[in-house]
Image (spheres, grey):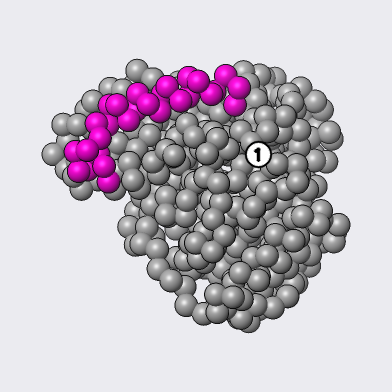
Amino acid sequence: MALTASELAKAVRAGELDPVQVTKDALARIDAADAVVGAFRRVRAEEALAEAQALKDRPDLAELPLAGVPVAVKDVTAVAGEYAEWGSRGGNQELAVADGMIAARLRAAGAVIVGLSRVPELCIWPMSDTPSGIARNPWDPTYVSGGSSGGSAAAVAAGMVPFAHGTDGLGSVRLPAAMCGLVGIKPGYGVVQGEAEGWFGMSEHGSLATTVADAALLLGVLAERPDLAELTAPGNLRVATSTLVPLTRAPVPKELTAAVDLVGTLLDGAGHTVQTANPRYGTAPFAILARWFAGPAEQAEDFDDALLQPRTRTHVRLGRLVRRAGLVREGAKQRWLARAEEFFAEYDVLVTPTLATLPPKARRWHELRWLPNVVPAIRVAPYPGVWNLAGYPAMSVPVGQHSSGLPIGVQLVAAPGGEARLLGVAAQLEALHPWRRTATS
């Protein structure tokens, strides 16, 4: 089995592995798999090898937390010598002269950026396809790998890289993590500081990995919080399980709800107090939808409308109407925050499904009109977004497989400041109910 990021970094620090060879191995895996998986918009083969060679001469190599670890970066952030495409042909393609916050922190920690992972246009959709390719699910390439961090998830689940950077505005780390059988964590508001906020403060940088320890390690680097990498036992917690779909109360496939029941049973056996309880979601989903329209419309001001995909042009037009009508309202967010705080006064962790349906099938979704994209997007993703609106930390962990062969993910949520608590609970679940680390393992 391939080494984890934690194991790779430890071996490079000790001089047992050559970072150049580690990078060559990752590039070979990408070359072998990505023609099918479509995880990368751009593979930085020559640049990555040069970075790995330079890393060998760093005097602090033995202290670097990510020494020599190959990583995929979501194609939305500045990387020196590259441009962030955002899945669109309508944006600025000038090469960045310097790293943005994410790339700078990764490089400072010793990681090697092997490529930029595929995203849907403006990160709107939970399926990551562009005119140049489709990010497919390594467990079954006839399904999507999710979105908008779908390329990052596909790269990790296919074993090309041990972990990857993602962003999450309405579940864009957790949805792909669930679809691809990974650990994916979105920290709470402001934990990863330093870059402009997206989607009215809902979007956060996070990590996707095959193990809880690796997800925590990467998050600690992104947040400049080494303490987050130190997994600790969470103690005995008050755990709520809920399968109620916010607002619509739509039916959820039994195998997805059964995974929540299984997690409840496992945590009860580990000494936690587990009860069934539903947050009072109220009209929070309407506030989310307003931001889902308005956020991309705000960003699209820097893009050429004529070059946007048809589905995106419609979405942006609606978003501009939402903005002009003043429908992004702080009051709606504050009312939901009050209900979320009320719920977490009674419970320490909430467990829900991550997905409400199986993933959509892989296809060139960007060639379809707006409505055929919106329907599957809304059906699959009702659970994660409310926690972006609240700014609460949340993550997805794998819990077995669906009868289709696809992985099943379960969402864990905690109150602000609860990242370490979530990681501790996830590590307990990993020990109690281990999962296959990649689609090929």
Q: Main secondary structure of the magenta part?
A: helix
Q: State whether residue 61 appears in this view.
A: yes
Percent x, y of residue 2: 42, 38
Q: Amino acid at mark 1?
A: Gly
Q: Position of residue 257 (x, y in %)?
A: 76, 60
Q: Is residue 81 left or right of residue 321?
A: left
Secondary structure under the numbered disc 1 in the rendered image: loop
Q: Is residue 382 visible?
A: no
Q: Nearer the viewer, residue 425 or 222?
A: 425
Q: Nearer the viewer, residue 66 or 304?
A: 66
Q: What quarter of the picture does the N terminus occupy?
A: top left
Residue at the spot 47% in from the left edge and 66% down from the top edge: 424
Q: Which residue is mark 1?
A: 146
Q: Provide the residue span drawn in magenta.
A: 10-37
Asked if 394 appears above or below 170 in the picture, the reply is: below
Residue 274 falls in image quadrant: bottom right
Q: Position of residue 157 (x, y in %)?
A: 55, 38
The answer to whether residue 165 is above or below residue 117 is below
Asked if residue 85 lies left or right of residue 134, the reply is left
Q: Is residue 408 magenta?
A: no
